[in-house]
Amino acid sequence: MTTHERPLDSVLETIGRTPLVRVHDGPDEVRIYAKLESFNPGASVKDRIGRYMLERMLEREEISPGGTVIEPTAGNTGIGLAIAAQQLGLEAIFVVPERFSVEKQQLMDALGAEIINTPTDAGMGGAIDRAHELAAELDDAVVPQQFSNPLNTEAHYETTAPEIYDALDGEVGAVVAGCGTAGTLMGLARYALEVHDDTHVGAVEPHGSLYGELLGDDREEGEYKIEGIGTHDTDTNELFDPGLVDAVYSVSDREAHDELRRLAREEGHLVASSAAAASVAAKRVARSIADGKLETPHETVVTVFPDSSERYLSKEIYRSFEAWSS
């Protein structure tokens, strides 16, 4: 994986085949592995859906070469779509609420996309509305909408999951992943349950997120610093299928911050808060398997580290918890 033995024609060919690396801070008898998605060219898991969604939409003639992709996004999805759009001969426009990461907006711009900011007060809902207004005004324009497009899930079913299973010779006992759109976990879950229907599937969310309510868990809505996962409105998370999920693991900002610093210091992983939250949850699952509280077909837990910490350095991610969370 990530070993290319021949020259490649396009950066799109470097997407996927990312390393699967052991996380060592767990019980010896239950191995934990993380898929390192920062090895993609746009440095995140969203490169996978950027390429996959646009290639399928072109094949289906939902958009034509030279057409325009318009997506409301605050981050990595925009970067992944921008890379794919440029290589596939498409224009890209991203509608971003003003308060979101300047670094990510600069990267989208560098990749040839047009950035349109919407008022912070209107939130992501305002960005979504503006994206659809723009699509209606332009000829041959489409809004992929990662939160509701089944191609998001399909991308991970077709690429991420088979890579994991090939690397581990099919010996996967549990899959655990953070849920933002939920596309990554749903793709992994569908594949895993087809291989072995006793595979444990765990969703990860921050304290203050409401995904757990979809499984009947009590949740108290609140703010959180963990980025890229979680939801305040489950009606917008159309891809999440509770029937594929065994448990939703809630992780606090403090736990995630402690873990992201530990992962860097002890294991050399420069990952962000969503990866750290996934690691915390994966270790919980591994301990439950080791203690005999959870039965799985194999004594392995697989998770996904979605991106790197470098896009969050301006937010004091490696400073004290108080500096990061303020």
Image: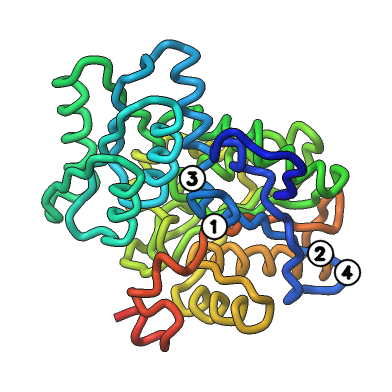
Q: Earlier in the sequence, mark 1 or mark 3?
A: 3
- Which mark is on residue 46? 3
Q: Residues within 10 Å of mark 2 (few under 14, many from 20)?
A: many
Helix, strand or loop status at disc 1? strand
What amino acid is at disc 3? Lys
Q: Which callout, 3 or 2, points to the residue nearer the camera?
A: 3
Residue 289 in the image: above or below residue 124: below
For marks 1 and 4, give the CA distance: 23 Å
Q: Residue at x 82, y 52 (%)?
A: 296
The residue labelled by disc 1 is 204
The residue labelled by disc 2 is 31
Q: Earlier in the sequence, mark 4 or mark 3?
A: 4
Helix, strand or loop status at disc 3? helix
- Which mark is on residue 29? 4
For marks 2 and 1, give the CA distance: 19 Å
What amino acid is at disc 1? Val
